Image (spheres, helix red, strand yellow):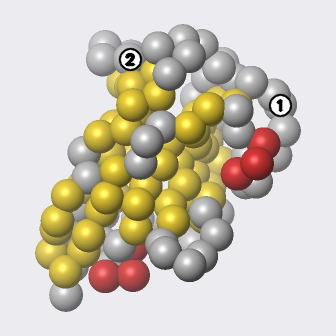
Amino acid sequence: VQLQASGGGLVQAGGSLTLSCAASGATYATGWFRQVPGKEREFVVSIRTLDDKTYETDSFKGRFTIFRDNANGTVNLQMNSLKPEDTAVYYCAARYGRSSPIEAWKYDLWGQGTQVTVSS
């Protein structure tokens, strides 16, 4: 299974952006993380393959939404009301195990990351 993330770019504060993660095979769940230089990779949201059940933390609830596009075989991250502090490299990741979705180390596969820059 390989992951390919895309859709990053430059957007003004308050704007929206949709990231896509294309996966070439089946996994238990797919998640999105983000990372800024000097900080640990941060969990954003995940979606379970079997039933599209999502898991998100309060940090992004109401602004970021994960959803599956079966027609294109992608797992997408819709980001609204973007803030300059959302600037980061965003990664999609997938895991085979039924583990907690938050810890990055529990994910087995990672995409290459896509840069999101939010200007003020």
* Point 81% across, 28% down: residue: 97
* Point 25% across, 45% down: residue: 7
Residue tagged 1: 98
The image quadrant where one finds the N terminus is top right
Q: Position of residue 52 (x, y in %)?
A: 58, 29
The outermost residue toward the bottom is 120
Which element type, helix, strand or loop, lies under badge 2?
A: loop
Q: Callout 2: 10 Å neighbours few (<14), some, many (20+)?
A: some
Would you place residue 10 above or below residue 52 in this image? below
The outermost residue toward the front is 38
**Does residue 65 appear in the picture of this structure?**
no
Say which label, 2 or 1, has the lower sequence index: 2
* Residue 38 relative to residue 11: left or right: right
* Numbered tag placed on residue 73 in the rendering: 2
**Does residue 56 appear in the picture of this structure?**
yes
* Residue 92 relative to residue 58: left or right: left
Q: Callout 1: 10 Å neighbours few (<14), some, many (20+)?
A: few
